[in-house]
C-alpha cells in the first residue's frame, strides 16, 4: 500500500534506492526528524519494508523511525520533497536519472551516494548527472568511510558532502548530522568522486593480498601506494590534493581495505582462495562496485596518462584472467623508483 505523500517542507527528502545504503541513509535522515520517503524498483520488496518497518533483507536490526515512509510510486515519491538523494549502483545511475528527467519539479536539488565511474564514457557521477539533467539545479555527492549496517545501528560515523553550492552542502550535512553522525562539507566534487571509485578497486587488491596470506606489511604498502595512485588520478582530473587525505580519500580507502564488511575486500579474498569471478559475486549476493570500476578506472587513467600499477594489476586479475599470484609478482618486479617520483 502506498504511503501518503509528506507535507511540503524544506527539510523533506526522497531517497531513491532501497538497498542497504539507501535504507541506512533514509533511516539517518528520518532520525533527525526530516520527513523522508524511500523508493525502490522492487514493489514486492517495498511492500515488505512498509509492513515490517525495517529492511529485513539488508538491515534487519534497524527499525524505521516514524518520519520515514515507503513509497512504491516514483512520481508520488517526489511530491512535496525539495531534495532528492540517489543511492543506486554506478551502472544504474544514468538510467535512474533519465527516468527522473521529466518528473523533477522546479526548485528540486539532487544528491547521490553513488560511487564509481561510468563504463564507456569514463564520466564521473556528477558529469553523468549534468549530461542527463543539465546544470541548472544544485547537485551534491555524499561519500566517506561508512558501512550501511553501522549507520543503521546508529554507531558514530563521519562522511563528506561535496557540492559547488556551499549552501546546499551545508543544509544536507545538517540534515544528516546528530550526536552519532557527523557530515563535513567540501566543494571538491571531483576529488570526492574519484576517491569513491578508486578505493573499491584497491579494496579488491587488499582482499587478494590478505587472502594470499601476505600479512600486514603488504596491506599497509598497498593502501599507502594505492592512495598515491588515487591522488594522481584525481589531480589529473582537476581535484584538490588535500581531499585525498580526508574522509572521502584515505578514510574510505582504509575502511574498505581492512574490514570484511567491505564487499570489494571479500570479493578479493574469494579470488585469492581460488573462486571464479562469477562464484565470488554470487557468494557476496550484492553489487561489487570494484569489478566494473577496475575497467573504468583503467580507461580513464589511460586517457589522462596516469600510471596506476596496483589498479592495473587488479584490472588484469578481474578482467583478463591473470592469476592473483602473478599479479603480485608483476607488481613486486617493477623497476625501482623514487617514492615521490
Image (cartoon, rainbow, N blue to C red):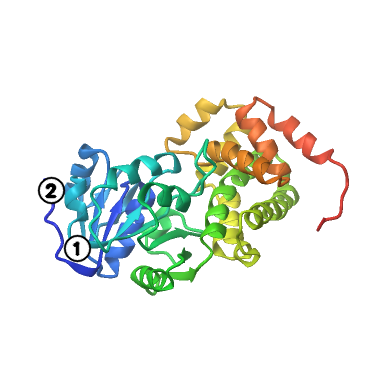
Q: Residues within 10 Å of mark 2 (few under 14, many from 20)?
A: some
| Corner quadrant of residue 250 | bottom right
**Quadrant of the drawing holding the N terminus:** top left
Q: Is residue 108 left or right of residue 264?
A: left
70 over 179 or under it: above or below: above
Look at the numbered disc 2 and give the secondary structure of its residue. Answer: loop
Q: Is residue 288 left or right of residue 310?
A: left
Which one is in front, 122 or 156? 122
User: Could you say where residue 283 lies in the image, as x and y percent from the top left?
Assistant: 47, 32
**Quadrant of the drawing holding the C terminus:** bottom right
In this view, the mark in front (2 or 1): 2
Residue 161 in view (yes/no)? yes
328 over 7 or under it: above or below: above
| Residue at the spot 46% in from the left edge and 66% down from the top edge | 164
User: Could you say where residue 253 lies in the image, as x and y percent from the top left?
Assistant: 59, 54
User: Could you say where residue 219 lies in the image, as x and y percent from the top left?
Assistant: 69, 49
Residue 66 image label: 1
Q: Residue furthest right?
A: 336
Which one is in front, 146 or 137? 137
| Residue at the spot 57% in from the left edge and 27% down from the top edge | 275
Look at the numbered disc 1 and give the secondary structure of its residue. Answer: loop
Compute the Cα span from label 2 to label 1: 15 Å
Which one is in front, 123 or 131? 131
| Residue at the spot 65% in from the left edge and 51% down from the top edge | 233
Disc 2 target residue: 2
Which one is in front, 304 or 65? 304
User: Could you say where residue 7 lies in the image, as x and y percent from the top left?
Assistant: 14, 65
312 over 168 or under it: above or below: above
Circles 2 and 1 in contact, beta carbons < 8 Å = no
Amino acid at each position: 500500500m502506498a504511503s501518503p505523500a509528506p507535507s511540503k517542507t524544506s527539510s523533506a527528502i526522497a531517497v531513491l534506492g532501497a538497498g542497504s545504503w539507501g535504507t541506512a541513509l533514509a533511516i539517518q535522515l528520518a532520525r533527525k526528524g526530516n520527513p523522508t520517503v524511500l523508493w525502490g524498483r522492487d514493489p514486492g520488496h517495498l511492500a515488505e519494508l512498509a509492513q515490517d518497518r525495517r529492511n529485513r533483507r539488508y538491515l534487519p536490526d534497524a527499525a524505521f523511525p516514524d518520519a520515514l515512509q515507503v513509497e512504491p510510486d516514483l512520481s508520488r515519491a517526489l511530491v512535496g520533497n525539495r531534495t532528492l538523494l540517489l543511492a543506486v549502483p554506478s551502472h544504474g545511475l544514468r538510467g535512474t536519472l533519465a527516468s527522473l528527467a521529466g518528473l523533477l519539479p522546479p526548485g528540486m536539488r539532487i544528491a547521490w551516494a553513488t560511487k564509481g565511474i561510468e563504463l564507456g564514457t569514463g564520466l564521473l557521477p556528477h558529469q553523468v548527472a549534468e549530461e542527463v539533467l543539465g546544470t541548472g539545479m544544485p547537485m551534491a555527492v555524499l561519500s566517506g568511510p561508512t558501512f550501511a549496517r553501522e549507520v543503521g545501528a546508529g554507531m558514530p560515523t563521519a562522511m563528506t558532502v561535496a557540492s559547488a553550492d556551499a549552501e546546499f552542502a551545508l543544509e544536507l550535512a545538517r540534515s544528516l548530522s546528530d550526536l552519532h553522525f557527523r557530515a563535513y562539507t567540501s566543494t571538491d566534487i571531483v576529488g570526492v568522486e574519484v576517491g569513491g571509485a578508486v578505493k573499491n578497486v584497491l579494496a579488491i587488491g587488499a582482499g587478494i593480498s590478505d587472502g594470499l596470506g601476505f600479512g600486514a606489511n603488504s596491506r599497509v604498502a598497498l593502501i599507502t601506494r594505492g592512495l598515491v595512485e588515487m591522488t594522481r588520478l584525481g589531480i589529473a582530473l582537476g581535484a584538490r590534493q588535500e581531499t585525498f587525505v580526508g574522509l572521502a580519500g584515505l578514510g574510505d580507502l582504509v575502511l574498505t581495505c581492512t574490514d570484511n564488511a567491505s564487499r570489494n575486500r571479500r570479493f578479493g579474498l574469494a579470488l585469492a582462495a581460488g573462486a571464479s569471478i562469477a562464484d565470488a559475486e554470487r557468494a557476496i549476493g550484492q553489487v561489487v562496485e570494484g569489478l566494473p570500476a577496475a575497467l573504468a578506472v583503467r580507461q580513464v587513467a589511460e586517457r589522462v596518462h596516469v600510471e596506476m600499477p596496483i589498479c592495473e594489476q587488479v584490472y588484469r586479475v578481474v578482467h583478463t584472467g591473470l592469476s592473483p599470484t602473478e599479479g603480485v609478482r608483476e607488481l613486486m618486479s617493477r623497476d625501482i623508483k623514487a617514492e615521490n617520483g
